[in-house]
Image: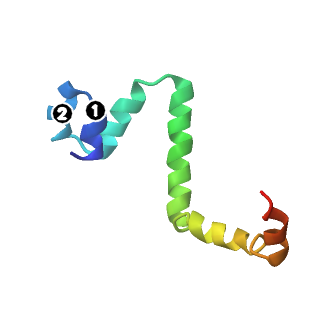
Amino acid sequence: MNLAQRFTRKHDSAINEIMSTQELIQKEVAGLPENLQREVYDFARFLREKSENGSFNGLVLSESALKDWNTPEEDAAWVNL
């Protein structure tokens, strides 16, 4: 089961075979109130920017933050907790 099939209603399943992903998105967004349409728009922009800038890698960011915490002084400060 693909993502479009998982989130569409049962009666839409026949439509999914002939509609493109863009058409499915437009159909779904059209039924949302304006404030939720804005959230979808913001999320689409986030995804585009993320793909243009390379994928977000939280692990690399986490590793860089650990350099400040991985010290003997930090170990000593937390030893009694």
Question: What mark, if any, has residue 26 been given in the picture?
Answer: none
Is residue 24 left or right of 72 when viewed as pictured? left
Residue 66, quarter of the rendered image: bottom right
Check disc 2 and report its element: helix, strand or loop: helix
From the image, tell me which residue sits under label 1. Answer: 8
> Badge 1: how crowded within 10 Å, few (<14), some, or many (20+)?
some
- For the residues bearing labels 1 and 2, Cβ distance under 8 angstroms: yes
Is residue 28 left or right of 9 when viewed as pictured? right
> Badge 2: how crowded within 10 Å, few (<14), some, or many (20+)?
some
From the image, tell me which residue sits under label 2. Answer: 13
Is residue 18 left or right of 3 when viewed as pictured? left
Residue 13 image offset from top left, x and y in percent: 18, 33
Quadrant into which the N terminus falls: top left
Is residue 5 left or right of 67 when viewed as pictured? left
Check disc 1 and report its element: helix, strand or loop: loop
Residue 76, quarter of the rendered image: bottom right
Residue 47 image offset from top left, x and y in percent: 50, 53
Mark closest to the chain's N terminus, 1 or 2: 1
Residue 14, quarter of the rendered image: top left
Residue 64 image offset from top left, x and y in percent: 69, 73
Instruction: Say above or below: 71 vs 43.
Output: below
**At 31% across and 35% down in the image, what residue appears?**
7
Residue 9 image offset from top left, x and y in percent: 25, 27
The residue closer to the viewer here, 10 or 27, is: 10
The residue closer to the viewer here, 14 or 79, is: 79
**At 22% across and 40% down in the image, what residue appears?**
19
Mark 2 residue type: Ser
Quadrant into which the C terminus falls: bottom right
